[in-house]
Amino acid sequence: MTALMKSVGVRAMKLLSSAVNFRLNQCSETPIRSLRSFSTLRSPPSKAIVYEQHGSPDSVTRLVNLPPVEVRDNDVCVKMIAAPINPSDINRIQGVYPVRPPVPAIGGYEGVGEVYAVGSKVNALSPGDWVIPSPPSSGTWQTFVVKEESVWHKIDKSCPMEYAATITVNPLTALRMLEDFVSLASGDSLVQNGATSIVGQCVIQLARLRGISTINIIRDRAGSDEARENLKALGADQVFSESQLNVKSVKSLLGELPEPALGFNCVGGNAASLVLKFLREGGTMVTYGGMSKKPITVSTTSFIFKDLELKGFWLQNWLSLGKVKECREMIDYLLGLARDGNLKYETELVPFDEFPVALDKALGKVGRQPKQVITF
Amino acid sequence: MTALMKSVGVRAMKLLSSAVNFRLNQCSETPIRSLRSFSTLRSPPSKAIVYEQHGSPDSVTRLVNLPPVEVRDNDVCVKMIAAPINPSDINRIQGVYPVRPPVPAIGGYEGVGEVYAVGSKVNALSPGDWVIPSPPSSGTWQTFVVKEESVWHKIDKSCPMEYAATITVNPLTALRMLEDFVSLASGDSLVQNGATSIVGQCVIQLARLRGISTINIIRDRAGSDEARENLKALGADQVFSESQLNVKSVKSLLGELPEPALGFNCVGGNAASLVLKFLREGGTMVTYGGMSKKPITVSTTSFIFKDLELKGFWLQNWLSLGKVKECREMIDYLLGLARDGNLKYETELVPFDEFPVALDKALGKVGRQPKQVITF
């Protein structure tokens, strides 16, 4: 802790404080502050995954013990239960994500916790409630998080905690993308690549609930037959590996399905071109990821004669449009689906002490792994 | 003519007839038809540029003498005055345009003519009126064109005929693109490549009339300094050659201009990437051509973090939406601008007999040339 405290100046501390409610300034033990502290509600000491500089997550993150912080009148202190490691968390630590907290910072962006203590002006939340930060915000990889009441969304405890911890980033992305771009009706279809991702799996299940068929594109790799069967078990109508789509026209592969008017791309490169190939005239492809790290290449005729539209989706941008209330309603809907077994995806729970193991798995160092969810 | 008549069967003749009102079946001189013809209004014999098969325009087109055709009750016979050679005309002859008349066909898609004769049920047009086919339709490269009254849009004769002949494809594309995608106000800006094209020149002038600044990208080639000055004389605010934009950020090149929310691309490849580079967050690029024959390549981050949208524009598609009335009003507006000297572009008038010379110029065989307009 001393090294961390020495490494940052007062200004940086303020930034850190505002970014992650990690109020180190509270622990400068002057007499006046000591006197004040008699009447001040404080969090317990916390353990957190901190990075002081951007870089490779396995070299710049470390577990740090943090002193108690003040719980102000409008604050809520939450004892974290579980929080996932998402690709965007890794990108934030690497410093390649366009919006990220200033360093030093605590990792994590979503999760679920139990209210531990509330400030004097907090009415809507009580100790014992389950809450998630919504919109998601930085600093969920710690045992106690203190943030303003407005940050927290109270949820029903009936949903398994691994879903509550992971509902705000990936499943919400799937639902928003399904709702916000093209108005699809029962009987319509959509096409997506990266179908084995959590967003992809959610798209399949959410579409199926609406009577919308899905055409799914997966990579050619060992185990793709198993992946295909898994997706079909979730409700996927068609699953193709990229090499199966190396044909002049994909229309004949559609069988009874109508040509899709909506496509989702989280891969780029050839896999994005395949989504475009499936789209019908006037269709829209929404890009929300670039796992292949390859750009998207589009022919002129796709725009002029096929009238395709290409757009992007970024949950963070979407939330900045002030649709928090609408998103919380969607989250409740998604949690209900998860509770009832209508929305499933694989997670692996990892105790907080074993964070480095979970991180290695999330970084893909040990092959394909389920979504890593840290438990506190 | 005999060869042409021999080369096509009855069925092909019917197709040809319906496509271009080139009614060869009227010249099968049976006694009954001869009797009927006493009471039948007919066009004069016509000369036309015909192609019997798709291929290189300079090898598949030829001048053909056509017999008179019937002018039915709702038909109007127009003596053509002038018609341009557009790139899309060339693509139709090559057979690479997605919508094209069946062969054999008469070339040309827009033009201006004078009403020569009208059918008995035609009320709104009279001999001497100037008309253009609107929406544009096939077969304008002939001396007399017979089409239904509804095809023809009567225009004011005060506009120079070279503008009347060319207003429906390129200037209308520029105006529609300016109106239909992003709502721009005075003080806003837009960016475009291929700025020396007729559409590009029209965009500059139409934008300027609305108080919208233009950032223009041109190719690096001999004469680019002169091209820059010509565009500035039309009202271009900034003109850059592609090599000038080989910088990390183009923001500093904007000077006082705001970042553009709208971009037009008719080139593809690097020139399209440069348009994207200029666009502000949330901006839209509209593709309406692909002169470089290279695809458009877009990074994933452009979609997700910069929230760019990519769309296409095709006048023909747009007209199929049934906006003929609106387009005719726009055409009248554009013709008024041309008449008053507020919309200018260079054309070269070429007598019909010298069509092969004009075609060679339009095909780019003799360097950069003004828009070739055939006069009849």
Image (spheres, coloured by chain):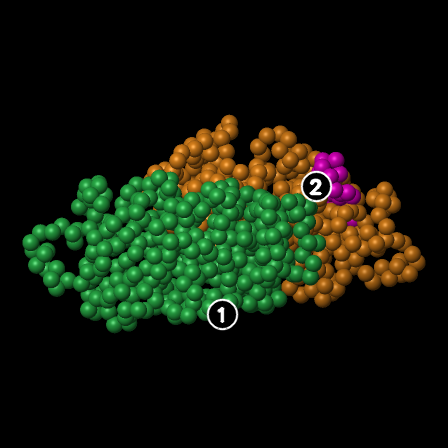
Chain colours: A green, B orange
Residue with the most extreme top position: B222
User: Helix, strand or loop at disc 1?
Assistant: loop
Q: Nearer the viewer, residue A127 or B84?
A: A127
Is residue B275 visible in the rendered structure shown here?
A: no
Q: Which residue is mark 2?
A: B94
Left or right: where does residue B310 sit relative to residue A319?
A: right
Residue at 66 percent across and 61 percent down: it is A257
Which amino acid lies under the numbered mark 1 shown in the image of this protein?
Answer: Asp
Report if residue A288 lies within the magenta region. no
Residue at 16 percent across and 53 percent down: it is A26
Q: Which residue is mark 1?
A: A340
Residue A252 place in picture, x, y as percent: 70, 54
Residue at 76 percent across and 58 percent down: it is B71
Q: Chain of mark 2?
A: B
C-alpha distance separating marks 1 and 2: 60 Å
Dot 2, crowdedness within 10 Å: few (<14), some or many (≥20)? some
Which amino acid lies under the numbered mark 2 shown in the image of this protein?
Answer: Gln
Q: Quadrant of residue B289?
A: top right
Q: Which residues are magenta?
A: B45-60
Q: Quadrant of the N terminus of chain A?
A: top left
Residue with the most extreme bottom position: A123
Report if residue B46 lies within the magenta region. yes
Left or right: where does residue B119 sit relative to residue B303?
A: right
- Does mark 2 fall on the same chain as mark 1? no
